[in-house]
Every structure is written in C-alpha cells, then in structure tokens.
Image: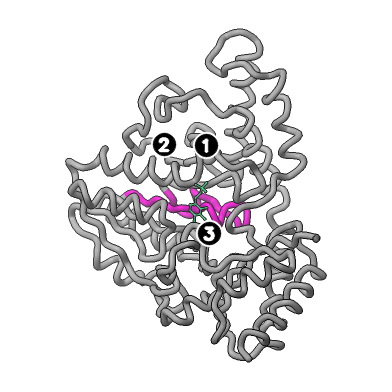
Amino acid sequence: MKIRYFDHAATTPIKTEVLEEMMPYLRQEYGNPSSLYSIGRGAKKAIEEARKKVANLIHCNPNEIYFTGCGSESDNMIIKGIAYANQRKGKHIITSKIEHPAVLHTCQMLQKIGFDVTYVGVNQEGIINLEELRNSIRNDTILITVMFANNEIGTIQPIEMIAKIARMYHIIFHTDAVQACGNIPIDVKKMGIDALSLSGHKIYAPKGVGALYVRQGIEFEKFMDGGHQEKNKRAGTENVASIVGLGKAAELAQINLENYEKYLMQLRNYFISQVQEKIQGVKLNGSINNRLPGNANFSFQGVEGETLLLNLDAKGICASSGSACTSGSSNPSHVLSAIGLSPELAHNSLRVTFGEDNTKEDVDYLVENLCEIVQKFRS
Ligand SMILES: *Cc1c(COP(=O)(O)O)cnc(C)c1O
C-alpha cells in the first residue's frame, strides 16, 4: 500500500541531495576532524562549511553555531548551561506552559536542584500572555525560554516582543525553534534572540544531529566533558556526515523557504476548508493567523484521536494525535489542556502536518478517509 505521510512535525524524510552530500563522509572521507592529515582536514573543512550554511539560515555568525546530538540536546545544553553559569546572579527561569518536553522537563530538573521556574500561561489560541510574562520577571530572573512555534498546534509566538521584554530587563532569551526553522523566516539578529535550538530531522536532514545558536558574549557552562570540540562546549568526535547533511538541509531550506511556506499553506488551507465543509462537529485547535504553514490540528467530537490514527494507518495514512513524544501516555496533552480544551476534546484531537512530499491528491485521499472513519465511529 502507498504510504501517505502527514506527520512532518514528528520527523521528515532525508532529502536525496542531503544524503548525497553526506555519503563521502561515511566512506572515503572518514578522517577525524581533529586530525592534521588531509582526510582529517577535509572533514574539519566540511563541518565549517556546514556551520556557515546553518548560520545563514537564521542570520547569525558561524562562530555562534554549536553542533549537537539533537534538538533536545540543544535545549538541555543551553538551559542548564545558562542556569549553571548564572546561578550566583539568580536562580529564576521563566518559560511557558506549552513547551516541548525537552524544555519542560529540563526546567523541572533544575527545580529539583534549587532553581525557581515560572510557567506562563497562554490564551485559547496558544499565544503566551505577555502581561503575565512581564509580571513574573524578578531581580533574580536569569533566563526566559519560550518556543518559537508549538509542535502540536503550530501556534507561532510573538518572539520579537518577548525578546524586547527580555532585553529591557537584561535577561537572556532562548527559543526552541525546532518547529519554526526552515518553515518560516528567522533572523536572530533582527528579532533580538540570544539563543536558539534547531534539529536536523525536522528539516529533511538525518535524525541525531542538531544545532544551537548562542549569541557571541553570552556565557554558558559546557554540557559534556572531554575533548575540545565545538569551541570546548561539546566534547566528542563530531558526527561529520550528519553535520554535513544538516548544513545541506539548511542551505536548501533557505533557498526554498518562500515557496515551501506557500506550498504548505496551500495544502493546509485546502485541508482545513475541506474538513470544515464535509465534517460536522469539528474544532480547529490553535490560531488561525499565527500558525505554522504546514500545521492543522482538529478535535472531532465523539471520536478518539487514537481511533482515528489506527483507522487512518490501515489506509496507509500517517498522522498524529497530539505530539509523538506524548503518544503512548493516556494523559491529555499539556498543550491542549493549556489552551482550555476539555480532557474529552483533547483526546479527540488529530494533528496533520504537511511536507514537500504531499500533494493535493494526497489531501483528497486523507479527507475522504477521515470522513468515512468519523462517520463510522460516531454512528
Ligand atoms: C522535535 C522537537 C524537539 C526535539 O528534537 P530532537 O532532535 O528530536 O531531540 C524539541 N522541540 C520541539 C519543538 C520539537 O518539535
């Protein structure tokens, strides 16, 4: 059966051009980038080329990019790194209630060792309450970390306004941009972002590689002890091939950004209008205007998200109920709860996230099957 994949917020397939760029570093160019002979120097040079490409995508200096093992590691590295480096100045961190577990659980871990964390609420669209954010700032606040765009409902935060508030109070501002990167334009300098996390496998590069941007001059403690790789911040021999892949994916994302964004939005808007036209008792979760181009999240009254998933899977369709990281647990999603959904409606949710491999015909097939499944399980 043909697989139709609508779960690009969970992961994306590797692009052919990305894989081709990686192959030499899995074969003949196997040198250690720290070695001085030619195949080592070649690998080192490839890493630095990739660094430039990632830097170009978010408009920072290449020396402000650190390669990591994944998006989660980038989040851990910067939140813990800033907490440890600034704990004499203060031990208070501000974040939002709808962060990815990589941020949420990192903050919870810091609470266990004596840090104080404020979790700011969001409105029905999932947009952070800026008044509450401002009111929660204290003399000992050292970090504000708020995600650029949400992985479940796709809501895009007013990042520039958050950055402005942080700057006004001389507080470091980090954003988890794993979902936003490569989908919408990001300019860390213009937007006033101090630190940013991104991940390879959400932008058509391999799993197990990520990057962290940290503005020059911001101090943070290193995450892993050992060798001096990544400006002495991340020990361990570099994952050269995957870093090269991430570089290529960033380059392609930058070149195609406008068209990609437009294409996703077309598919997404078509899907939303088709669902609203053909199925009664549906609720679109998240924001209409401040939304990632490829994200749709619906609650279908009276039908469990899991039922939808399993029955769609039987038709070769991949989608998600809530985020992949929380599926398997029966608690309603913390994001859907935070935007005020009842536990029942939260359990009735289905997330569909589009990518470059999807077509309008795929969407028709999806809608057709959704209609049948919803009808069948409601009656
Ligand atoms: C996927 C994701 C992560 C984690 O990235 P990994 O590379 O899978 O560790 C972090 N934050 C957000 C918002 C994500 O969507």
Nearer-N-terminus badge (2/1): 1
Callout 3 amino acid: Ala
What label does residue 324 carry, if any? 3
Q: In the rendered image of this protein, does residue 186 appear above or below residue 299?
A: above
Residue 215 visible, this angle? yes
Q: In the rendered image of this protein, does residue 279 appear above or below residue 90?
A: below
Q: Quadrant of the N terminus?
A: bottom right
What label does residue 216 carry, if any? 2
Q: In the rendered image of this protein, does residue 265 appear above or below residue 147?
A: below
Q: Nearer the viewer, mark 3 or mark 2?
A: 3
- Determine the secondary structure under disc 3: loop
Task: From the viewer's side, name the closer residue of 274 and 53.
Answer: 274
x 48%, y 34%: residue: 66
Magenta stretch: give its range: 172-193
Q: Which of the 4 quarters of the picture holds residue 118?
A: bottom left
In whole angstroms, how far apart are the C-alphas of marks 2 and 1? 9 Å
